[in-house]
């Protein structure tokens, strides 16, 4: 598919929306309340081939392009942000298709596609996440393999995942990527974090204490990890943008439904001018964010260098839209918006982290300003 194949993309969106509403939405409140992985909706995704969406057909995948991933992330987040992030985290393992050995690909990708393997990335550490070059986790070569030491914090799918892609220091100014298995000696996990939102997305510390892995688990070339991560983060910011955008769209949908059905002073709340003004502002935020996100995706798919700059712009636009729209949606629900029985309460909590992770919006602004000044 290409960016001009609008009918195909629209059909794909419609099919994912139906799936999300039928098989994902019914469990969204439950996994949030129980703070557990969305196993029901993740398993149901096998019916429509979502786990293998971006992966090559030779592994049983769909070979879907980035825009299909953006659409799917958006539509899943529209009803359950936790399901969406658990799914898109697996898609980040496209880095193994790009840089990993054939043996590593054969060991990992088919398992993701058939739903038997869950994955995680290990980047952030206790002392910070934005300064990736300041990490202290280390890997040293021994006769028996690589020995890893360090702690990774706030790891999405942590403890639940079977495979962990770990970013570690291999020399003073060199970094590498390693594939660590859940049952590797020396690997352990911290307690699951008690989070404000995205409670259905398992998150914990990943701890490596003299963790020994085979030499073959080095991803790509030694010392090239920083360049691999930079490319992966560029792409993942677009998916995170879609994640935030989907939350915003879901909140607007709920607000429209509620204000149309709710009556005050003998008429639907949707008839009040102030309410309509709020809804219009919410719609403007969403459509503006969607436009810049899709433009960034278009640039990325065409290999345009400006995509890097636009990815940061899109990440800010989408996450700020998510926070603004969900807050307004709660307001439009009045007192009911403060109750857990209404999805907007969950959506508002889920939205906040989108302004923080994958590079805080403040870090994104620094990157944007640097690019703008470079062109001045």
Image (spheres, rainbow, N blue to C red):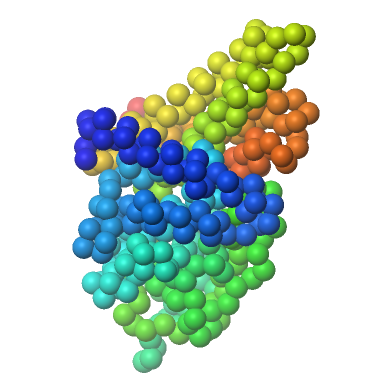
State the image coordinates of residue 142 (x, y, percent, origin top left): 39, 88
In this rendering, position of residue 167 left or right of residue 254: left
Q: Nearer the viewer, residue 143 or 102?
A: 102
- On screen, 365 above or below 117? above
Residue at left 64%, top 47%?
29
Residue at left 70%, top 26%?
333
State the image coordinates of residue 221 (x, y, percent, origin top left): 28, 70
Residue at left 67%, top 60%?
193
- On screen, 262 above or below 135? above
- On screen, 58 above or below 9? below
State the image coordinates of residue 111 (x, y, percent, origin top left): 36, 68
In this rendering, position of residue 345 left or right of residue 104: right
Residue 206 seen in the figure: yes
Q: Total label count?
A: 0
Q: Nearer the viewer, residue 85 or 142?
A: 85
The single residue placed furthest to the bottom in the displayed view is: 143
Residue at left 61%, top 12%?
276
State the image coordinates of residue 122 (x, y, percent, origin top left): 49, 64
Quadrant showing the C terminus: top left
Residue 229 seen in the figure: no
Quadrant showing the N terminus: top left
Q: Nearer the viewer, residue 353 or 78?
A: 78
Q: Nearer the viewer, residue 261 or 180?
A: 261
């Amino acid at each position: 598919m290409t960016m001009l194949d609008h009918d195909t993309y629209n059909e794909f969106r419609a099919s994912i929306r139906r799936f999300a509403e039928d098989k994902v939405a019914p469990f969204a409140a439950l996994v949030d309340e129980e703070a557990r992985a969305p196993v029901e909706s993740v398993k149901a995704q096998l019916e429509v081939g979502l786990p293998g969406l971006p992966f090559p057909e030779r592994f049983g995948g769909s070979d879907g392009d980035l825009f299909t991933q953006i659409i799917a992330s958006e539509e899943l987040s529209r009803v359950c942000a936790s399901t969406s992030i658990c799914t898109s985290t697996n898609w980040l393992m496209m880095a193994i298709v790009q840089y990993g050995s054939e043996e590593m690909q054969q060991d990992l990708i088919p398992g993701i596609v058939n739903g038997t393997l869950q994955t995680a990335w290990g980047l952030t550490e206790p002392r910070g996440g934005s300064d990736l070059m300041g990490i202290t986790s280390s890997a040293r070569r021994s006769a028996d393999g690589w020995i890893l030491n360090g702690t990774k914090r706030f790891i999405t799918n942590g403890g639940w995942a079977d495979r962990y892609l770990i970013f570690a220091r291999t020399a003073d100014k060199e970094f590498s990527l390693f594939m660590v298995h859940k049952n590797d000696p020396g690997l352990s996990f911290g307690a699951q974090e008690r989070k404000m939102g995205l409670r259905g997305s398992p998150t914990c510390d990943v701890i490596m204490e003299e963790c020994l892995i085979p030499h073959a688990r080095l991803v790509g070339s030694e010392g090239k990890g920083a360049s691999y991560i930079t490319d992966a983060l560029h792409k993942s910011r677009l998916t995170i943008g879609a994640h935030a955008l989907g939350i915003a769209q879901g909140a607007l949908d709920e607000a429209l439904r509620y204000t149309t059905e709710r009556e005050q002073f003998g008429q639907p709340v949707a008839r009040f001018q102030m309410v309509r003004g709020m809804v219009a502002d919410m719609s403007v935020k969403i459509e503006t964010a969607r436009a810049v996100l899709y433009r960034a995706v278009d640039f990325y798919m065409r290999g345009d260098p400006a995509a890097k700059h636009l990815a940061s712009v899109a990440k800010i636009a989408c996450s700020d839209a998510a926070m603004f729209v969900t807050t307004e949606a709660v307001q439009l629900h009045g007192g009911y918006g403060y109750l857990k029985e209404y999805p907007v309460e969950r959506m508002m909590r889920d939205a906040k982290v989108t302004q923080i992770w994958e590079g805080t919006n403040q870090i994104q602004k620094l990157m944007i300003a640097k690019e703008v000044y470079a062109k001045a």
